[in-house]
Amino acid sequence: MNDDVIDCPALHQQSADYPFGRRVPKTVRMLRHVTPDPMPGIGLAFLDQDKPIPEASAEALIPVWTNRHGAVAAVLPDGQRLGLKPDEFEVVEWLDLGPPDPLPAALALLKRANRYVSVHASIGGQKLGAEITEFIASAGRQVRKGE
């Protein structure tokens, strides 16, 4: 991984609701000036009082950190993170994760097929069920080996 890439959860795993497909935001352009939203009851007391209030200026190009659900935070020069709403930025540089790894999907399909065969074999097709189960097990071994 490049030194200028911020390691973040989205590079390693994405939830089912991840909005960016097989890409992870790397750099954003701020569409407006952004500061932290005050929390009800405590205002900005949650911020580190020894550091300046984090802010991002309109038009600034800022590297970002993204969680596995797609929430984006600006990473400021002093290391502080500033959570961003989707209408506050536009992505100008992406990290392409490439095609998804087919192995987990193939193994899930084999497990589903195995459950289906097991149910049908117990209904009365034991010999056929055993043959199909062995075929599925053999296919699973081939998938694991990458054949």
Image: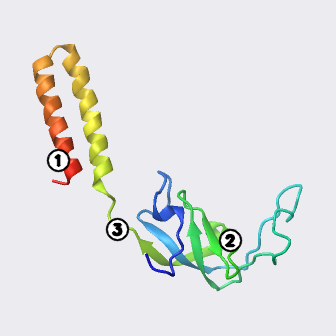
Percent position of residue 33, x then y: 73, 79
Above/below status of 127 relative to 54:
above
Percent position of residue 67, x then y: 56, 61
Residues packed near mark 3 inside 10 Å, few (<14), some (14 to 19) or many (20 plus): few
**Helix, strand or loop for disc 2:** strand
Amino acid type, mark 2? Arg
**Alpha carbons under labels 1 and 3: distance apart:** 23 Å
Residue placed under numbered mark 3 in the picture: 98
Amino acid type, mark 3? Gly
- Mark with earlier residue (1, 3): 3
Residue placed under numbered mark 1 in the picture: 142
Percent position of residue 55, x then y: 75, 78
**Image quarter of the N terminus:** bottom left
**Helix, strand or loop for disc 1:** helix
Amino acid type, mark 1? Gln
Which residue shows up at 81% across the image and 69% down it?
Answer: 48
Residues packed near mark 1 inside 10 Å, few (<14), some (14 to 19) or many (20 plus): few
> In screen coordinates, is 12 left or right of 128?
right
